[in-house]
Amino acid sequence: MEKRNARHAREIVVPGDLLDDSGMTAGNNAYVRDGKVYAGILGVKNVYHDAVGVIPLGGRYMPTTGDTVIGIIEDIGPSNWLVDINAPYPAPLHVNEVPWKVEFGDTSKYLNIGNVVMLKVLMVDESKKIQVTMKDSGLRRIEGGQLIEMPHSKVSRVIGKSGSMIQMIKNLTDCRIFVGQNGRIWVDGDENAETAVEAIKIIENEAQSSNLTERVENFIKKRLPQKKEDDGEGY
Amino acid sequence: MSGHTDMVLVDKKGMRIDGRKTNEHRPVHIEAGVLSNADGSAYLEIGKNKVLAAVYGPRECHPRHLQDPTKAIIQCKYNMQAFSVSDRKRPGPDRRSIEISKITAEALEKVVLTELYPRASIDVYIEVLQANAGTRCAGLTAASVALADAGIPMRDIVPAVAAGKADGHVLLDLNKEEDNYGEADVPLAIVPSTDEIVLLQMDGNMTRKEFDKAIDMAFGACHEIYDIQKAALKERYAVSKEDDGDE
């Protein structure tokens, strides 16, 4: 979804719009009828090599294997938790997939309803059954900090090209930030956390405009005048 | 179709009581994304009809037994507000609204790529705020804009419009008087890119010739409404883009 190499004019397409009739293949969110490619969702037309597709402007988050997401525990079973990850389906987290040794029935001692956890999507099968795991480096239960929710389609702007945006925010504000692919973002830090949150809000509101990284950088620097340039490299 | 009137619904010049020609539909206004709590929404006015549509999902399907392991189901609720007609409408579902909910859901099922979301449900709510004949078409038109606004994958957007017969003339997009005192009412919804029919009903009597003429007019009007639907969706994001630039 994040392949946006050649920047063409941003053309908004609606379902049923003709994308191409010169023999290109259908990319994401597009379909072929009679050899012509049509848009299958509301979004921005995107040409990538010889495929033409649509980058959605909204819609539900659909998990794919390997995504890192932030989930909220919804329900507890004797050997698993049900986690809400903003997807159309609940994601079960089995006791084998957490970094602790959990006795049968002791699940609520480790994670309780309302707890927030970092997860990785282990598997999504063709019937869209989801499995998530916490057994990976850096995945843990989240305590403290702030949770921001935004449409998942805007997450790629928060991360930026190969992480440039998020790295810049982390460097400047000295905050710990974890971006979930499902549109949930966790921010934790000292006095600068507010600034980081506001910067992310700016990205959310202006996700469609260009030169965002520069403007967000200027915004943060304006908000943190007391900070000298050189000690921003911490963390 | 039921009552009788001395009213001249179509005069000698072919002018109707609201000043339209026989092949003219009422002015349509559509706005997408009017509600913030629903995943997608649309507000539609066609003549004196005012309709609001909201979409949730795809989300987990409740009750469980309605789930389909191969595709998402579309659940539609068409509801008329008590104040939508001149005599107070008794609130709550009735035979008519259940029928309209069913046919709307079935029409939308044809365009939504339901197989992408097995076991899920997509919920569509249509609220008629003001009715002046043709609300099922207005509701379906609004609902398909709301679905696209919700970012739900679909093949095309569905426009709908009614045609009918009153005072011996074949008319497009009947209004209240023409519907009540006319001879026939034929609502039609199509998939514009393929010209497939997803909804076709008929109430009253027409000859085959008149029916063909009515369908032809309705097809033409559907394509016009389709352009308005697309413009409404594009405008929603064009505006937000400008706003972003200003901030």
Image: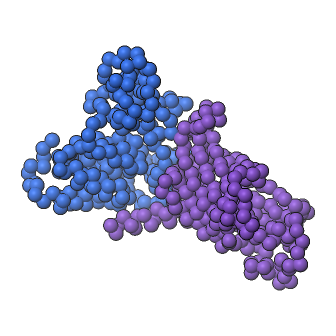
* Residue at the farthest bottom position: B13
Residue A98 position within the rendered picture, expressed as x and y whole percent measured from the top left: 34, 24
- Quarter of the C terminus of chain A within the rendering: top left
B135 lies left or right of B212: left
Residue A68 position within the rendered picture, expressed as x and y whole percent measured from the top left: 35, 36
Q: Nearer the viewer, residue A223 or A152?
A: A223
What's the colour scheme? Answer: by chain
A61 lies left or right of B14: left
Q: Is residue B116 visible?
A: yes
Determine which quarter of the picture holds residue B168: bottom right
Q: Residue at x 55, y 65 (%)?
A: B31
Identify whether A154 is placed above or below B212.
above
Identify whether B127 is placed above or below A63.
below
Residue B90 position within the rendered picture, expressed as x and y whole percent measured from the top left: 72, 58
Q: Nearer the viewer, residue A59 or B156?
A: A59
- How many discs appear? 0
Q: Nearer the viewer, residue B50 or B119?
A: B50
Q: Residue at x 12, y 49 (%)?
A: A232
Q: Residue at x 29, y 35 (%)?
A: A142
- Quarter of the N terminus of chain A within the rendering: top left
Q: Is residue B68 visible?
A: no
Q: Colour of chain A?
A: blue
Q: Residue at x 87, y 61 (%)?
A: B204
Residue A138 position within the rendered picture, expressed as x and y whole percent measured from the top left: 26, 31
Identify whether B222 is placed above or below B60.
below
* Residue at the farthest top position: A103
Q: Colour of chain B?
A: purple
Identify whether B192 is placed above or below A138.
below
